Amino acid sequence: MQLSPIMAVAVFCAYFAKGICGFGNTLVFGSVMAFSADNINISPIDLIVSYPSDIIIAARKRKLIDWKVFAIMSACMLVGNLPGVFLLKTGDARVLKVVFGLVVAAIGLEAILHRSRGERKKPGLPVMLIVGLVSGVLCGLFGIGALMAACVSRLTDSADAFKGTHNAIFAVEGVMRITLYSLTGIITLTTVKTALCLMPVMLLALWVGGLVSKRTSEKHARLIINIMLAISGLYLCVANIVSFI
């Protein structure tokens, strides 16, 4: 997959969003690039470009990372990656994307409603384990961490703690996925060259998004995260239902 101006714009928009919310880069990048490329070509580029951003955000927010949540969710994600990468290499995942989109949209909308009523219930360990495993499969397939983001958002006490914990999880998961993508031939030399060319765009967008984030209140930051979850889930549903028509 060759570098293009559209790809550079997609990366800037994706990592501007990540600078603000701490996630969402794959949803934005994938949404733009899906019109001209298959997921098997989109995911490896986003993975390589995203990996430094995960480390940067996790390092910035390291003092606020919830290490218990990090340990449990990272372990589950690594286990789930294996079948996810296998499905990416061999299968048609459109049906799963539709189901996943509905779940993520429902989680985002439910979180918005609970926040408006002042309610906030943390998931228990069984839910954490299930979400971690399913998220690992979905990340292996699509690189999308919205379901994980929804769960970690509930488990952490602030937007900064969410950003640190969520990106620390993906810094670990990224090592596993880069290894699996390389072993299965999903990552190629062209993929690496394209991703490296996009790194400066990613860093600029992440910096600009971070500046905007500093001027955003805790309440508004949480609201933005939940709105992005709802929109991203609905988009995945519609886009993949249309692909069947």
Image: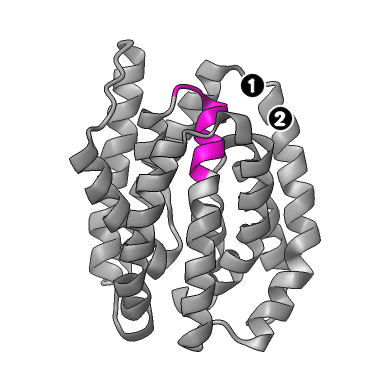
Q: Which residue is mark 1?
A: 216
Residue 114 higher or lower than 22, as above or below: above
Farthest top residue in view: 118
Residue 45 horizontal/vertical position (percent): 60, 71
Q: Residue at horizontal 37%, vertical 48%?
A: 73
Q: Which mark is residue 212?
A: 2
Marks 1,2: beta carbons within 8 A: yes
Q: Is residue 232 visible?
A: no
Vertical relation: 60 (above or below) 83: above
Judge left or right: residue 71 versus residue 213: left
Residue depicted at x 26% and y 72%: 244
Q: Quadrant of the N terminus?
A: bottom right
Q: Which mark is residue 202?
A: none
Residue 47 locus on image (x, y percent): 57, 66
Residue 239, position as x, y percentages in the image: 37, 61
Residue shown at the point (31%, 77%) measured from the top left: 87
Where the C terminus falls, by quadrant?
bottom left
Q: Secondary structure at mark 2?
A: helix
Q: Amino acid at mark 2?
A: Val
Q: Residue at x 61, y 30 (%)?
A: 63
Q: CA distance from mark 1 to mark 2?
A: 7 Å
Q: Could you say whether the residue bearing mark 1 is in a helix, strand or loop?
A: loop
- Whether residue 217 is visible: yes
State which region is magenta: 157-166
Q: Position of residue 41 (x, y in %)?
A: 53, 78
- Quarter of the image holding residue 68? top left
Between residue 241 and residue 225, name the one nearer to us.
225
Q: Mark 1 is on which residue type?
A: Thr
> In the picture provided, is 225 more to the left or to the right than 129?
right
The image quadrant that residue 111 belongs to is: top left
Q: Nearer the viewer, residue 151 or 16?
A: 151
